[in-house]
Image (spheres, rainbow, N blue to C red):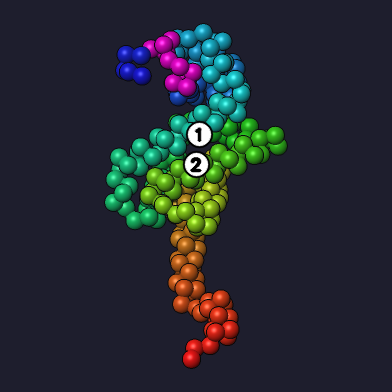
Amino acid sequence: MTDATTPADMTLDELRPVLIEALLPNVAFDGWSETALDAAAITVGIPADRARLVFSGGAADMIDAWIQKADRDMATELERRGGGTLKIRDRITTAIRIRIEQARPHKEAVRRALAVLAQPQHAAFSARTLWRSADAMWRAAGDSATDFNYYTKRMSLGAVYAATLLFWLQDESENDTETFAFLDRRIETIMQVEKMKARFREQASHRPRLSRFLGRLRYPVA
């Protein structure tokens, strides 16, 4: 796709982020609905039927596209801010701060999205998108874990991000200062857990292995 490509010439996949941008201002009034999507189609300049084809899965499909776009935008902005030069704790904190800052103009859209995700039929979808966002943050922060640590890190960060998002929705402080203070406290908890895990692994590496001990019993050193 080139800069000269118009929405009318875009593929359905290319239209997703374009429609999301046009859709967000309408969500505060019409929710994640076909009404909001039809208005976005007019803004973009494509037929409503084509826009509905892009998001054939309805509200959940629109929200999924928004979250994916937010994950990509977060990674891009973290790199722009020099995330690679920060300590790991600061990278993770900054990643979540970026997500909050980018969502700030669309707070009602976030509120309505969470209401959709809270519905029982979307439980698995909600868990999947939260995991994906946590994974995107850790990857943007340079995490390369492949062992069990990979899963625990994402579970912990997902819980922190979800709690911070819910806190933010109720926060009326200037520039979300209370939310970011809340975030700092939660990140501190994660870092303390990671330090404990690192100490445990270090101690475990110096403990005699049971297999080695049993081997010596069977084959004593002469």
| Contact flag, marks 1 and 2 (Cβ < 8 Å) | yes
Q: Residue at x 50, y 34 (%)?
A: 67
Picture coordinates of residue 174, whole percent (x, y): 43, 42
Residue picked out by circle 1? 67
Picture coordinates of residue 209, whole percent (x, y): 53, 76
Kindly indicate the quadrant of the structure image that contains residue 82: top left
Is residue 110 within the magenta segment? no
Looking at the picture, which amino acid does disc 2 mark?
A: Ser
Is residue 11 within the magenta segment? yes
* 37 w.r.t. 155: above or below: above
Picture coordinates of residue 40, whole percent (x, y): 50, 16
Task: Tell me if 23 is positioned left or right of 58 in this view.
Answer: left
Tell me the crowding category of disc 1: few under 14, some 14 to 19, or many 20 or more residues within 10 angstroms, Cα based.
Answer: some
Q: Which secondary structure lies at badge 2? A: helix
Q: Magenta stretch?
A: 6-15
* 68 w.r.t. 206: above or below: above
Residue furthest out toward the right: 120
- Sequence-first tag of 1 and 2: 1
Q: In what quadrant of the picture does the N terminus appear? A: top left
Q: Residue at x 32, y 53 (%)?
A: 86
> Predominant secondary structure in magenta?
helix
Picture coordinates of residue 178, whole percent (x, y): 47, 49
Looking at the picture, which amino acid does disc 1 mark?
A: Ile
Residue 133 badge: 2
Please name whichever residue, 117 or 111, is drawn nearer the observer in this view of the structure.
117
Kindly indicate the quadrant of the structure image that contains residue 60: top right
Specify whether residue 175 is in view: no
* 161 w.r.t. 11: above or below: below
Give the tally of numbered discs.
2
Please name whichever residue, 63 or 165, is drawn nearer the observer in this view of the structure.
63
Specify whether residue 16 is in view: yes
Q: Residue at x 35, y 37 (%)?
A: 76
